[in-house]
Image (cartoon, rainbow, N blue to C red):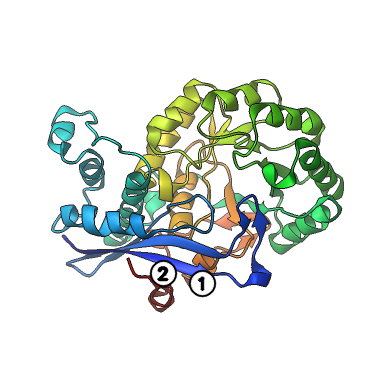
Amino acid sequence: MRIERIEARWVHVPISYERRHTSDFGRVPSFDSVIVRIDTACGITGWGEAKAHVGSAAACAGLATIINRDYAPMLLGQDPRDISRLWDVLYNTPREGYAIAKGHGVPQLARRGLSISAIAGIDIALWDILGKSLGAPVWRLLGGRRMERMPAYASGGYAPPERIGEELAGYVARGGFRAVKVRIGAMDGSPRRSAARIIAARAALGPDIGIAVDAGGTWTVAEARAFCRMAEDCDLMWFEEPCSADDKRGIAEVRACSTIPVSAGESEFTRHDFRELAELRAVDIMQPDLAIAGGISEAMRIAAIASAFNLRLAPHLWSGMPGFAAAMHVAASVPCGFTLEYALAPNPMMHELSPTRFPVEDGQIAIPDRPGLGIEIDTAFMARHTIAT
């Protein structure tokens, strides 16, 4: 088995004005991602996803070019099943020989950002190929699924205080969700207004529906602490990215000041960033985005850190179908995985890129036993929305 072809495409799907949601990113006009296709000489195709931005809209030309022009030539002719070695080749090149022989990383300088996202897209596709070659789902290759169904929470929550209860109740009704997540932070203008929205949400949903909040890293430490004080009695599941991901000590300060659990990680790259979050005691929950942080291989290493520090793992899942499926397989197989994010804002990269569906029933998603990632890709849809790079 040999890699015969690698192609990364920037897929850009406009969202009609009336369907766009508004957050601190503004009114989001599109969903963009880089979809990676790897073909083998024996006819197996693997699909992956790489992201240039944790949100929906992003310019992805540079990311696609890194994969097509930089990484693809290194992998042609290689055995796609040698996933660990190939990850090290991409991360350490041109010093991969030292890294593999010595058993420790000798990364190329500046190995962060888009270069890691590019590795992520390739890595996910390689795991898809491995699973398909063995006729086994990826979770089986990772050690087996720990449960056949996993709880999911509805992610969205943008309405003002007077309508937030109605919006979230609609989420609960759509799939029997037992938990929801609400966006707060700079989009509200002040911690007090964010707290008012959450207090209204709790009053509308009652005590039995879990509520998480996500500030998207938009507050200062003082503002985040003020919100904690005002929302302390709302029994929140977690407070996500209370302040900038660049201020890990600040996140730790927020965690130390309140009983509300803190989560972070969607903006981080590789296990090394997550080790720092753990060592600083900054989070209760780690949230890697597999299409950014290094793929399935790196997510398993991140999960090992989380488990060693007695933390939990809830992958960031504002992504397309390949990224979603990859994170689902990881979360279902690691001891610290406990829930899945299910975005309810318009997401054509999830619901139109692929005919595969992961329906939410009674607030849970069944973990499939189809080979590889267990997904199909609508190549005609992808072709219609490809931006030339």
Q: Relative to residue 292, is residue 249 depicted above or below?
A: above
Q: Nearer the viewer, residue 316 or 311?
A: 316
Q: Relative to residue 82, is residue 357 depicted above or below?
A: below
- Residue at x 51% of width, y 72% of height: 352
Please, what is the three-letter code of the amino acid marked with disc 2? Glu
CB under 8 Å between callouts 2 and 1?
no
- Residue at x 54% of width, y 65% of height: 30
Check disc 2 and report its element: helix, strand or loop: loop
Q: Nearer the viewer, residue 3 or 6?
A: 6
Quarter-of-image position of residue 113: top left
Q: Quadrant of the N terminus?
A: bottom left
170 lies left or right of 345: right
- Residue at x 25% of width, y 47% of height: 83
Which residue has dot 1 on it?
352
Residue at mark 2 to residue at mark 1: CA–CA distance: 11 Å
10 Å neighbourhood of mark 1: few (<14), some, or many (≥20)?
A: some
Which residue has dot 2 on it?
376
In percent of width and height, residue 212 lies at 69, 42
Which dot, 2 or 1, sits closer to the camera? 1
**Labels 2 and 1: the sequence-earlier one:** 1
Please, what is the three-letter code of the amino acid marked with disc 1? Glu
In percent of width and height, residue 303 lies at 44, 36
In this orientation, does residue 310 appear? Answer: no
Check disc 1 and report its element: helix, strand or loop: loop
Quarter-of-image position of residue 208: top right
Q: Quadrant of the C terminus?
A: bottom left
In percent of width and height, residue 299 lies at 41, 41
In this orientation, does residue 238 appear? Answer: yes
In percent of width and height, residue 28 lies at 60, 60
303 lies left or right of 228: left
10 Å neighbourhood of mark 2: few (<14), some, or many (≥20)?
A: some
